[in-house]
Image: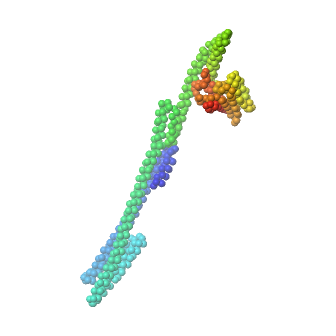
Amino acid sequence: MAFFKGRFKKAFTQRAYGKSLKHLLLFHDLYFITLIILAVASGGYGIYLWDKASKQSQRINMVIQEIYLVRGDLYRQVKELFDAFFLQEENALNEYNHYTASILEHLQRLQSIAIDEEERTALSEIESKYRKLVNEAPTLFYRYQNNPNKQAQKSIYQDIETGIFTHYEEVSKRAEHLLMIKQSEIKNRLDDARSSSIAVLSLPLLLACVLILYSRRILKRSIVKPINDIMIATNAISTGNLSHQVPEAGAEELAVLSKEINKMAEDLALSRDALVKSEKQAALGLLVPMLAHNIRNPLASIRATAQVIDAPDKDTQESVHGIIHTVDRLERWTGSLLSYLHPIKPMLNQLLLSSIVQGAILTLQPKLREKNIRVIEDSSAIKDLILTDEHLLEQMLYNLLLNASEASAKGTDIHIRCSLQENMLTLVIVDQGPGMPFKPDPHAITPGPTTKRFGTGLGIPFAFKVCEELGGSMQFESRTGIGTRITISLPQ
């Protein structure tokens, strides 16, 4: 039963999960129909066992009844024999013959009822003993009646009594033994029929309990729990938690519904981010040009005035130079902000990579000489022309190299490794700085953090934006105290 239960559980479970509701209902109906058929078959089999046991019981009862009749007729036959010879009754011999015919008829009926060799053997012995009794008893009585010698009559009388009753007891004991066997057999038959009927009829009930148990479990795991998860997810999504995911489990329809809800939440999250980005970009686009215009004009006047100041002492000259450097820094900040907010439209051309890399390094030479930093690059090894926007790529490299030079210590090296394989241009920039304290976000809506005192935080976002417009990607790997590795991949 445990084996059947395990196989039933495995089969039902394998068919339940991942199936559609239609299939689940179909399997459920098939299992119930199978259970009904099994219940009917079990009931029929139980009725068959009971009918078989009942027929066998009736047969054994007939055997017992016939044996009792044989014993009764045998007793009456012997009594009629004594009445005929000792009491001189006229009809005793006729009754004796009548009982003889009755006993032989009962024995013949018993032979027709017998079904096994043991019964036939026992009945044959009973018939043999009885025929011996029938043949010997009258002879002894006639000897007793015709012998005038009293002593001889007494001896014959003892022979009659001993012989008749010996035969009678043998036949009676054999009949009683067969009767006990049949009574024991009918008891065993009834016990077996009762046990078999209970076992057979309890099997459908047990299977019904198992089916109810696993139907409830499958219903809970395939329908109830997924629906509950969907309700929880919809409540979470309606409150703005678009990162909530619904487990894609249960019936096929519910799994598809969960998948579509997850996709809807992802689409809503992307739409929300895009909308927020668009709104912020639009707000900055309106604010920054006006701010830049209002700042640049005073800055130009301040710088022009500072340039024409002819200071006689050194302290005043240093202050004037500080004013000019501050004005230039504010001008660069304003220009970077405008270039970040301005829509980028790449102009693709076939160019040499080495000319672009050298152009970015050349612009950065004053800063590199100031800190005695070397830029080691191998762009000249790529002889094939690349398809890119010269000014955007150069400006992106300039911003990244500027960050690397400002983060690097004096006297260190910056490496640029270039490769072109399988229509993919890869540029790797490695510095020996202290590493970045933050991880750049390529999807940042606002300017990112900066490690420089007067930094704008626009260099890396601008580089991400250029990579995105050129169809490429950029990854940052930073280790504290060792440096930063930037990998740029641009498709060709």
Point out the image quarter for the C terminus: top right
Q: Is residue 135 visible?
A: yes
**Residue situated in front as seen by the camera: 99 or 480:** 480
Asked whether, in this view, residue 215 is left or right of residue 263, the answer is left
Identify whether 212 is placed above or below 480. below
Q: Position of residue 360 (x, y in %)?
A: 69, 25
Q: Position of residue 246 (x, y in %)?
A: 50, 37
Relative placement, left or right, of 490 versus 254 is right
Could you tell me which residue is drawn at 60 percent across and 25 percent down?
A: 451
Q: Quadrant of the N terminus?
A: bottom left
Report the residue that reaches farthest toward the bottom: 149
Q: On the image, which quarter does residue 131 sit in?
A: bottom left
- Whether 229 is drawn above or below 151: the answer is above
User: Which image quadrant for residue 371?
Assistant: top right
Q: Is residue 452 left or right of residue 184?
A: right
Would you place residue 124 above or below residue 427 in this image? below
Is residue 50 visible in the rendered structure shown here?
no
Give the residue drawn at x 48%, y 54%. 3
